[in-house]
Image (spheres, rainbow, N blue to C red):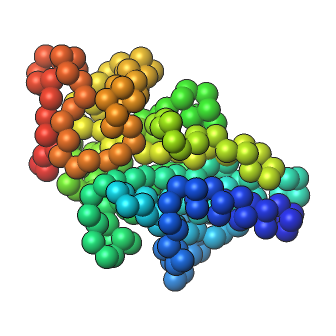
Amino acid sequence: MSTEIYDKTNDVRDVLFSSLGKVDTDVIAHLINPAFMGGPQWPTLRQAFSIIRTDDSIKVVSTGLSDPFDDVEEPNNGFKIEIIAETTEDLGDDISSSWLFKLVYSISRQAAHNGKMAEFIANHGVITMELFAEDDGLDEFQNENGMVGVMIGVEHPDIPKIVQFPAEEIILATVQILTPDELEYAVEYRAEGRNHLHELMKKSGIYHYIIPNRQSLLKGVNPSSASPWWKFWDKS
């Protein structure tokens, strides 16, 4: 690994995060790295999460997925992605126990495990994924099957999606939680469904801002004859 690329990556990432709000001095990190206990390994082993605040919202963002791989000599920026989620909800003082952190943490683990998330987003614009609500501490967002649907890569006019880092372009991937109907729709209609939902998020002004208990964006679109066109979040 190039020490120069590593240092420059930290500098560029710090500037990027600072452009999105006030960054907390402390990061959220493990006392014992999960990679030593069978978890997915990040490029330099470092697994950290930053908190970014504005007057109206709070963001949690992964810090380390774009570090250069420590066992690769060629200039690189690791998995070429960082995961970010944002809400205007009050999360209290302990962000590390909040659903917002658990969401970013879970998707970041998937990004490290798969290694191709940035490539998928670059090729498809947005991707969707299902998380196990109970395992990931996201029970309040689960559908009747105990799953939580998420869309990754939602575009926003004020947040860059593709950022030039020292060695490569990286994707700053915003996350939106899907309502049960939206998840059902995305599963049934695949790329067409994902793209339609993405357009609805942008046109509605919701974008990636996560609002618990929001209604479905599928006004007048019936994912299946067995379900209404909207639902509230409902814990089974």
Q: Residue at x 58, y 40 (%)?
A: 161
Residue 207's spot in the image, x, y percent? 38, 37
**Quadrant assignment for the N terminus:** bottom right
Q: Residue at x 40, y 24 (%)?
A: 199
Residue 18's spot in the image, x, y percent? 58, 61
Q: Nearer the viewer, residue 222 or 112?
A: 222
Left or right of 55? Residue 174 is right
Q: Residue at x 52, y 68 (%)?
A: 23
Residue 92's spot in the image, x, y percent? 27, 72
Whether residue 62 is visible, yes or no, is yes
Q: Residue furthest bottom?
A: 31
Left or right of 200? Residue 9 is right
Residue 54's spot in the image, x, y percent? 42, 60
Q: How many marks?
A: 0
Give the vertical position of 24 relative to 206 (above or below): below
Give the vertical position of 222 relative to 166 (above or below): above
